[in-house]
Image (spheres, coloured by chain):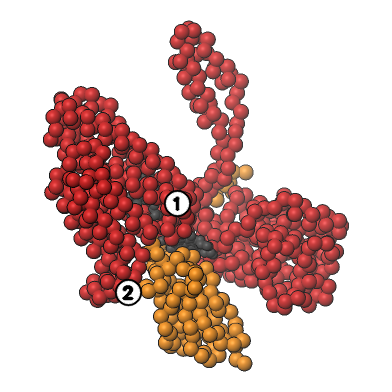
Chain colours: A orange, B red
Amino acid sequence: MNRPTGRAAAVAMRGLLLGGGLLLAAGPALAHAHLHSSQPAADAVLAAAPAELQVALTEPLEPRFSALELRDAAGQAIALPPPRLAEGDTKRLVVSLPPLQPGRYTVLWRVTSVDTHRTEGRFAFTIRQP
Amino acid sequence: MVWDLLLVPARVLHLGASVSLAGALVFHAAVATLPSRRWLNGCLLVALAAGLLRLLLLAVAFTGADGPGAALVAVPDVALGSRIGQALLVQSALLLGATALAGWLSILAALLALLAQLAPLLASHAAAMQDGVLLVALALHVLAGSIWLGGLLPLWQAVGALDLAQARYVLLRFSSLALAMVVVLAATALLQAVVMSGGLPGLLGTTHGLLMLGKAMLMLALLGLAALNRVVFLPRLPAHRTALRRSILAEAGLGALVLALAGWLASVPPGLHEVPVWPLPWRLLGWGWVAPPGWALALLAVPLLAARPRYLALPLATCVLLALGGAAWGVRLDWVPATPTSFQTSPQPFTTTAILRGEALAKTSPGLRALLHPTPAPTTEGDLFWHASLAAPALDDAQRWDIAQFLYARQAGLALREEGAWPAPMPAPDLALVCHHGGDTRLSALRGQVLRLAIGFAPTVPGTLSVSLDPGSPNADCTARDPAARHAYALLAGLGAEPRLDGLWLLVDGQGWLRGSGFRTMPDILEEAALAIGATPLGPARAHH
Ligand code: HEM
Ligand code: HEM
Ligand SMILES: [Cu+2]
């Protein structure tokens, strides 16, 4: 009756002993992005090219020290104007997009929140062939 | 980035200098001895220099420059174009003004210096969280901390320089002021800890939580020294003046440590938003009472019987102590084995495809297959992630979470079979649907309605939306896109091994929780279960980080 519990405890203990290194390695990858939502949404497949990119985060932002980058499928950066805050929403960055060809695009966001914290992340969207 | 490592020390230096300055000016206004002009000017100079250093380091961090040289051009931009920059400028101006007024408009000087402490709070966590109550608490916390700790060195100076009567007066006055500040500090610390820590896992398992615990320990040590000063040294003053001064100096040293932890604390993300790493091999599942035996109760009466009517206080106190001891003895704590990831949840959404991916992965190694035999101890999704990580070190985190979600769903289903209920509230795994009205959608987009998921035929229930897990089924409001989703839901119903699933139904409430399941039951059971959902809501679904 006692054995299974004992085994579980042993596994937990071993985990603790082995765990330090493993966990340190796992830590950063476990950390979550700070993205609340975006337009286009992450992994969206669009029928037409969007005119604008919006990225909403979980905290008010410093727009002058926040950047949005767009890369095409080949990893080539697409020139964008500096992002601005959305009208009446200090958590949302907006940038107008040039006309985009069909294909897969990656958005890299690197933002500073008003508490001076810097976070970054990425997501992708696809524009379908017409 | 090595320059980023300097951000916290610069913040601590800045905090220490501005707290010392504000505390000294309040000391002068409220306790009435001017600390030496040299001390005030020194504090001001360090505060201004550290503020400038912070601006420079922030410019490095914000612009991603290689070093301070390259970031120098961005300093004006950071100073004028960011909240922290503006706050630091305003704070510096207020501190300058306060120091200039010191000596002739002491109350105004003190008020300006206290106001200066509030400026940087516009760039605090509480401000970023847009929580007004938290921000007010933090403001009171910082003011109280400044008045108490910032007054210690002026007090030390005063006790050394004044004659006995004056020193005694100053000590008494300062200690009443400090006591009030300690009460404010403790109350606001508690409030901040409750809101920001993310519970016990956040307190013990994140840097922010551990720093808070460290501050609490230091605060206790500070209070110990303060009590020693007040109760032991103050009444024996002429003889113990040196000891008292030494003790005040030690207090100031501990205070500097507290401020170091405070500056560090304010620079790391609150435990609430971090992934906690549980440090203990056990966790507390719950607690209960064990009734004490009768003789223990009888024991309580003994001190009372022995008491004489005139001296009741001592026996009563003994009784209370005995009762408390007995209560502590009677508490039964349910400890279960824990893993460092016990309190972590998957960063990816709970979906049928994740469960199915996890099932496929779980077959790939003997170590993982061994996890299919569930342990009797309760496990969380995070525990299963840990076990999967140990069993399959070559997989990446996303794959381990897939396995954890599969195992979690499977165990929940087995428990449902055996015990008639899921052991913990289970969210309905998300899946892609096609609906009559609206076309392509997902289960998670249908929040707010009671959903009736079914395989094969299921009777209609008024007030619910029917979702068939059979793709292309003609009679349902929505149908699953992927036939494999059936197996994922069968696992959750404890029917993973069943070859024919026709007749399985599950109910999902408006918040996305699974609320009941049946297999080839009479139609009225489904109807009853659907009605029961409306009567007993479960609360909002777990926000999936
Ligand atoms: C002698 C006692 C204490 C003093 C003088 C003190 C002082 C401070 C100061 C000056 C700050 C502001 C830091 C900054 O914004 O740069 C702060 C923040 C804070 N303190 Fe304290 N503190 C004390 C005790 C405590 C205790 C015991 C706790 C909790 C257990 C606590 C919890 C906090 C929290 C949660 C913050 C906000 C940190 C953040 O923004 O993430 N403090 N404290
Ligand atoms: C530095 C201070 C931080 C503050 C003051 C803060 C504050 C907040 C607040 C107020 C929310 C709720 C926003 C909402 O949903 O409306 C939130 C959500 C969240 N935060 Fe933080 N956060 C901090 C740092 C972090 C960090 C460093 C991470 C991850 C690396 C993080 C990850 C998250 C996640 C994943 C959510 C949930 C997002 C969602 O799905 O809505 N936070 N945070
Ligand atoms: Cu932050």
Q: Which residue is tagged 1?
A: B134
- Asked whether mark 2 lies closer than 8 Å to ligand 3, one says no
Please state the horizontal and vertical placement of residue A116, each as a whole percent of the image: 37, 64
Question: Label 1 crowding class (10 Å Cα cut-off): few <14, some 14-19, many 20+?
Answer: some
Instruction: Please state if B173 lies on the left or on the right of B470 as rendered.
Output: left
- On screen, residue B177 above or below B389: above
Task: Give whichever of B272, A85 is nearer the camera.
Answer: A85
Q: Chain of mark 1?
A: B
Residue A119 visible, this orientation: no
Quarter of the picture for ligand 3? bottom left
Dot 2 falls on which chain?
B
Q: Is residue B463 above or below residue A38?
A: above
Q: Say whether residue B481 is left or right of residue A46.
A: right
Give the structural element (helix, strand or loop) at label 1. helix
Query: Which numbered marker is on residue B42?
Result: none
Estimate the x, y position of residue B236 in percent, counting from the top left.
Answer: 20, 24
Q: Quadrant of the C terminus of chain A?
A: bottom right
Q: Nearer the viewer, mark 2 or mark 1?
A: 1
Going 26% across and 39% down the picture, which residue do you hit?
B30
Report crowding for label 2: few under 14, some 14 to 19, many 20 or more residues within 10 A (C-alpha).
some
Task: Name the residue at 86% across, 56% down.
Answer: B524
Q: Percent x, y for residue B447?
A: 68, 64
Amino acid type assigned to the residue bearing label 2 in the image: Thr
Give the residue type that dot 1 points to. Answer: Leu
Contact, mark 2 vs mark 1 (Cβ under 8 Å): no
Label 2 to label 1: alpha-carbon separation: 30 Å
Q: Residue at x 41, y 72 (%)?
A: A63
Residue B269: image x %, image y %? 41, 59
- Which residue is tagged 2? B63
Q: Please tell me whether mark 2 sits on a helix, a strand or a loop.
A: helix
Q: Where is the N terminus of chain A found, in terms of image quarters?
A: top right
